[in-house]
Amino acid sequence: MRLFLHYCSTIVIIGIYGGQVCPFLESLTPLQLILPLIVALAASLLVRRLILPHYITPAKYQQQSLRVFLLEFMLFVVSGFFLMAFNRIVYDFPWSSGLKLVLAMTTLGFFLAIDMALAKERELSALFWEKKFDLDPEKHYFPFPAKLAILAVSCSIFVCGIIFLVINKDLDWLGTVGKTVPVAEAQRSILLEFVFVFGVLLAYILNLVISFAHNMRTYFHNENSVLIQATGGHLDGAVPVSTSDEFGVMAKHTNLMIVGLKEKTEELQRTRDVTIMSLASLAETRDNETGAHLLRTQRYIKSLANHLQDHPAFKEHLDEETIELLFKSAPLHDIGKVGIPDHILLKPGRLTPEEFTIMKTHASLGGDALRGAEKSLGSNSFLRLAREIAYCHHEKWDGSGYPLGLMGHDIPVPGRLMALADVYDALISARVYKPAFSHGKAKEIILEGRGSHFDPDVIDAFLAVEGEFVQIAKEYSDAGE
């Protein structure tokens, strides 16, 4: 459609332009002037269709835009020479008349070719975005300022050439009929010619400006979109590298930067995850519980969080990233046990009230340690969630828990989820002072704590995913370890 509009515009413009710049062309009827042009343009379209699959399509992507320009430009130049030869043979017009048509067709062909090349760049950009292709812009580098300079110089030459022809024709006309035509009529005629010529040139130049701006807007949009995603921590985006200029180089190195950031981030995350599990496992070795307790509880809490993700009361607290961080930070819930004396932590029986008071301090010890890490490293989502879990996994819905005695919705969501996950695992696990309870018995005890120990909404989530709890307990059982 874009090409068709250019061809239609060419027919209209040449039909009017011919009489404005050449007295010989002015002597032709509209049909005599336009019919050869239509034939030439129809032949150009046919030749274009034949050449396109052999000249443009097989070419390397970085060469296709240039080849589009060369093909469209040369077709118009050849059409101009055809018109010159036709008028010379049929009407015996002088070569000077034909050269004016060649200049007109060359000028219009230049604007058309640039516009179609820019459209090809947009097409390639969309293709690369969809197919995840990339060019190597530094292999066939062509600076963007050089493109603009060539465009500006070329436009200036063509515009000056057209204006010179119009002025030259008007001077000849005035010399011929200047004494028989009133001055006002001559001025009006000349003014209309200049308005038409300037209007056409301005329209084509504005079209190129808009086309360039469209391409640049696309480049900057792609670049900014990926950078904004990267700023938000999403490092899976990539800018399509579709041009061999500064924009392509910028896109290429943006992608390399993001790949490097992603690799470093993943390395840091792996290091963090291994460190968490190592520290948590070290704390567990001082307890009568097992490392499988860590694996089970982090999966229990993830199961509850996934179910509550769309619950109105939890929706703003449980997005995908937060749920993943809950899963990663859950093993740190009992990290404070490293500060409990061995004679209490490892006691093979029930604790005395005094000993239990000391044992309860593990929640504060763990929370304080993670708060200190926040002060040293700076607060982030992971440390905040880990601190809330360590502090609050023994808080109770009715306010009778420890260490802060929080009540109801004052208890952070991670603490509420961990409270149920931790109690459930303690109930189904064997201890020196009790046997392992069945899922049914554990469920009964947990339901008794609805509204007193546990958040009722968390209880509802537990009932909805209890099958997952049973499967997790079976898959990560102590016996299996």
Image (tube, grey):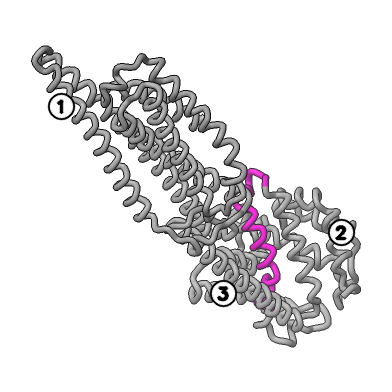
In this view, the residue in front, 345 or 72, is 72
Q: Residue at x 37, y 37 (%)?
A: 106
Question: Counting other residues with Cα less than 10 Å from the Cα at mark 1, is it few (<14), some (14-19), or many (20 or more)?
Answer: few
Check residue 85 for magenta coloring: no
Residue at image mark 2? 470
In this view, the residue in front, 314 or 403, is 314
- 419 shown above or below 82: below
Q: Residue at x 38, y 25 (%)?
A: 87
Q: Are marks 3 and 1 in contact (CB under 8 Å)?
A: no
In this view, the residue in front, 366 or 124, is 124
Question: Counting other residues with Cα less than 10 Å from the Cα at mark 2, is it few (<14), some (14-19), or many (20 or more)?
Answer: some
| Earlier sequence position, callout 2 versus callout 1 | 1
> Of tags 3 and 2, which is closer to the observer?
2
The magenta stretch is 310-337
Give the main secondary structure of the magenta stretch: helix
Left or right side of 254 for 192: left
What is the x, y in percent for residue 105?
38, 33
What is the x, y in percent for residue 296?
79, 66
- 386 shown above or below 209: below
State the separation of the CA atoms marked 3 and 1.
93 Å
> Of tags 2 and 1, which is closer to the observer?
1
- 410 shown above or below 262: above
Q: Residue at x 26, y 37 (%)?
A: 161
What is the x, y in percent for residue 342?
73, 87
| Residue 357 visible here | no
State the separation of the CA atoms marked 3 and 2.
33 Å
Residue at image mark 1? 171
The three-letter amino acid code for the residue at tag 2 is Val
